[in-house]
Image: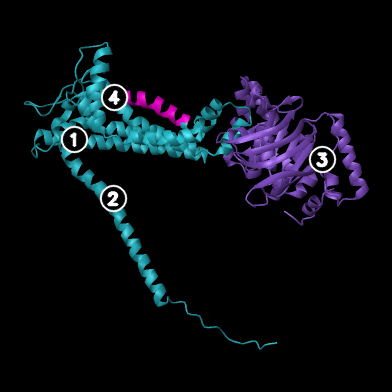
Amino acid sequence: MSNELQTAATHTESLGNNQGSTEPMNEATSGPKIIDPVFTLEEVSVSYGKYVAVTGVNLQIPSNDITAFIGPSGCGKSTLIRTLNRTNDLIPGASVAGKVMYHDADLYDSKASAVEIRRRIGMVFQKPNPFPKSIYENVAFGPKVNGRPKKSELDAIVEKSLRGAALWDEVKDRLGASALGLSGGQQQRLCIARSLAVQPEVILMDEPCSALDPIATLRIEELMMELKKEYTIVIVTHNMQQAARVSTYTAFFVTEVNPLGDLRTGKLVEYDETRKIFSTPLDPRTEAYVTGKMG
Amino acid sequence: MGEVKVGQRSVVLSPSPHLARRLHAQRVARYTMLLATTVSIIVTLGIVASLFPTAVRTIITIGSQIIGISWAPLFEPPEYGILPLFTGTIFIVVIAMLVAVPVGLGAAIFLSDYATFNLRRVVKPILEILAGIPTVVLGLFGLYVINPLYVEKYWPIGEPLAYSGLGAGLVTGILIVPIIASVADDALSAVPRAMREAAYALGATRREVAARVVFNAGLSGVVAALILAFARAFGETTIALMVAGSFPKFTANPGDPMMSLSAFIGFAGIGDAEVGSSAYNTIFLIGAILFLVTLIFNVVGNRIISKYREVYE
C-alpha cells in the first residue's frame, strides 16, 4: 500500500473522530489500514453494456479475515464480488474499468488466465448449486479438472474438504448418493466443500444464506468463523445482523439514481472495521441503513 | 357498546344462476376434452386393429420362410425372406446416425456453450429451415449429387450403381442433423447458468464445463433428441426409396442398392395391391413390424429418460 493512501486513511479517520458521525465523507478512498491486502481495488467500475452497475470503488481486503459487502438491492455489491474472480466475464457485455489487484497481480491483465484465477479464488453462490452428480463426485470435480489425482489422493481430498465444511459426519455413509437429495443447508455446505477441494486462497460468498432457514444459516456462519483461520473470505449479504456477527470489515454500498431517474449506479459509501460501521459510522446514509431506517 | 345478537346467520350455499351456468360450462369442457383424448387413443388402437390381424395371418402363412435372404413377395413364385429389408434398414439408420450424432451434438454444444448470443440467434433458425426441407428434395439431392458425384466415384467396393444404401444413409443423416442439434441444444441451453458458474468457479475450462457438467445435466434431453432422430431415420421412406433404390439386396456392402422396411411399403403400397394378394398381406406385415419396433424404441427411450430424471432431479 502506498504512503499516500495510508495518509489519506488516517486523515479521514481523524476527521471522523473530531467532527462526529454526521459529516459525510467526500471520497471513499479511506478505510481501515490493511497490511498485505489480498485484494486492492482502485477506482473500479463495472458495466453491463452501457449500464454502469457500480463505480468508483477503492478498497483493500485483508487476508485470513471476513470482509462483508452490505447495502440495499441494486447497489452493485454482487456485481463487485463477481469481479474478484472474473465470474462476470461469463456475462456478455460485462466490462471492468480501474484496477483490481490480487496481491501484486492485476486480475484483468491480458495475460492473466481466468481459469487460474478462479482456481485460486473460489466462489459460493446465492442458491446452493450442486452438480447433478453424487456427493463424492461434486467434491472431486475440481481436483479432477485441475490435475489427475490418484483414487487414494482423491478420497483423502474429498474427506478433508467435507470435514472442512462440517459435512463429513452427515454424509460419510452415503458419498455415492445424489447431492440433490441433501437439504438446502447441506447442499450449501457441500458447495463450500467443493470449493475447498481445489485449495483456494480466497472464498467469495454471494449471499450464501439467502436461501436457507435460520438454523442452516447459523451453521454456515459457524463454519465461516472456522474457515477464516485458513482462508480469506468475502461475503455479500442482505442480512446486516449476519455482517455484524461474522465479519471483521464491512463495506457499505448505496444505489445512486441519476437526475433523470432512469439509471441506477452502485457506490461505495463507507468501508471500515465492522464494529465502527455498526457503532460509529461516518456517513449518515450508513447510519440510516444499519439502524434500519433505510434499505 | 352494541347489543350482541343471539342466533345463527343464514347462509345460502347453493349456486346462483350465474354460478350454475359457469359450472355447466365447466362440465361441457370436461367432456369435450375427454372426447378429444378418447379419439386419439381410438385412432391408435384402430391402427393396431387394422394392421395386426392381417399381419399375424400373413406371418402364419409364410412360416419359417421369413428367416430368409431373398425378399420378392410380388413375384411368382413369391419369396418371403425378410432379412434383406432388415439389413437395408440397419445400414441406412446406422450410417445416418454415424453422420448425424457427432455433427448434431457438436452443433448443439457449440450453440449452447460456445456461440455468442447473436450468432446463436442467426444459426438456430437456419438449422430449423434445414429441418423443414421436404424429404423428396433431399432424395433428389441424394440421387443426383451424393450418389453419382461421391458414392460412385469414391466408394472402393463393388460395382458403381445409380443407387446405394450408403447414399441413402448419408442423406438421411443430413435430414436428422437439425433434429439432434435443435432438440439437444434446447436441453443443454436449459441447464441453469448456476451450474456453469459453479464449474467455472472451480477452475474448469469452457470445454470441461460443457463436457462434464452441462452435457451431464442435460443428458435426458440429449437422449430424447437421439431417440427422436433415430425414430425419424428408421421410418424415413422417401429418401430410402429414391436414393437406395428398390432392390432388396442381402449384402454387406453399403455401396450396393438396398431396400428398407419402410421403403418396401412405399414401393408396394401405392394403391394397386389387391386385397388378399401377396403384396397386400406383406405390406401389412411390414407395417406391423415398423409399428412394433418404433413402439419398443419409444418405451426403451422413455425408460432411459426417466432413469436419468430420477438421478438428476
Say left or right for B253 vs B13: left
First reached walking from the N terminus: tag 4 or tag 1: 4
* Residue kind at label 2, given as amino acid type: Ser
* Residue kind at label 4, given as amino acid type: Gly
Q: Nearer the viewer, residue A281 or B24?
A: A281
Q: Residue furthest left?
A: B76
User: Mark 1 — residue?
Assistant: B285
Say left or right for B212 vs A122: left
**Which chain's residue wears label 1?**
B
User: Mark 2 — residue?
Assistant: B40
Q: Which residues are magenta?
A: B93-110
Specify the chain shown as cyan. Answer: B
SS for dot 2: helix
* Quarter containing the N terminus of chain A: top right
Q: Nearer the viewer, mark 3 or mark 1?
A: 3
Vertical arrangement, residue B77 with respect to residue B306, above or below: above
Measuring from the top left, give residue B3's x and y in whole percent: 66, 89
SS for dot 4: helix
Q: How is the image coloured?
A: by chain
* Residue kind at label 1, given as amino acid type: Leu
Q: Residue furthest front?
A: A259
Residue drawn at the location 51% of the way across and 27% of the way down? B211
**Which chain's residue wears label 4?**
B
Q: Is residue B303 visible?
A: yes
Task: Specify whether disc 2 shares its chain with disc 3.
Answer: no
Task: Specify whether disc 2 shares its chain with disc 4.
Answer: yes
User: Mark 4 — residue?
Assistant: B169
Task: Specify whether disc 3 shares its chain with disc 1.
Answer: no
How far apart marks 3 and 1 lie (CA) works out to 79 Å
Query: What numbered label is drawn on residue B8?
Result: none
How far apart marks 2 and 3 lie (CA) works out to 67 Å
**Label 1: few (<14), some or many (≥20) within 10 Å?**
many
